[in-house]
Image (spheres, rainbow, N blue to C red):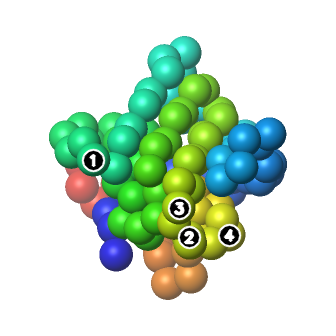
Amino acid sequence: MYDLVRMGQPVTVIQKSSSKPGVQRYEINRSITGMDHERFEASEEILGERPPDKLAKAIFELGGVDKITMNSNVITVDLGKGGVDPNQIMAIIVDMFTYYLPGVEVPSFEDNSDQE
């Protein structure tokens, strides 16, 4: 579906509704943008390959999303008139940072010593 840079530690995602209808906030226990504020619109091509770029691309692929804003550990998604399930967005956020899924072999120190 999408190729993302993954990390080994689980991510906690808390989904919150906004006071604005159709807007969902997702707070995670990772800073995805550092101190930067990132904005993405469905009508604009995303050229970058950084984690916020890849996350925005993956969320837009669901369809029904107009805008995405990321600031540190908060991801705000404007669902517009789309019918995307907010739980699908949460799953994408969690999966982006999870590398050690079933079937992924955990490297050992012995594996690395063979390469030297």
State which tag comes first along the sequence, 1 or 3.
Answer: 1
Mark 4 = which residue?
A: 87
Residue at (34% x, 75% y) in the render: 1
How many residues crowd mark 1 within 10 Å: few (<14), some (14–19), many (20+)? Answer: few
Q: Give the mark count.
A: 4
Nearer the observer: mark 2 or 4; the answer is 2
Mark-to-mark CA distance, 1 and 3: 14 Å
Q: Is the Cβ of the residue at disc 2 closer than 8 Å to that at disc 3?
A: no
Give me the disc on residue 56. none
**Vertical side of 47 occupied by 71: above or below:** above
The amino acid on which the numbered mark 2 sits, given as a three-letter code, is Val
Nearer the observer: mark 2 or 3; the answer is 3
Mark-to-mark CA distance, 4 and 3: 17 Å
Q: Is the Cβ of the residue at disc 2 closer than 8 Å to that at disc 4?
A: no
User: Can the viewer see residue 20?
Assistant: yes
State which tag comes first along the sequence, 1 or 4.
Answer: 1
State which tag comes first along the sequence, 4 or 3.
Answer: 3
Camera-side residue of 116 and 98: 98
Camera-side residue of 79 and 91: 79
Residue at (47% x, 76% y) in the render: 104
Q: Secondary structure at mark 3?
A: loop
Camera-side residue of 73 and 59: 59
Mark 3 = which residue?
A: 81
Mark 1 = which residue?
A: 43
Mark-to-mark CA distance, 2 and 4: 9 Å
Res 49 quadrant in image: top left
The amino acid on which the numbered mark 1 sits, given as a three-letter code, is Ser
Mark-to-mark CA distance, 1 and 2: 17 Å
Give me the disc on residue 84. 2
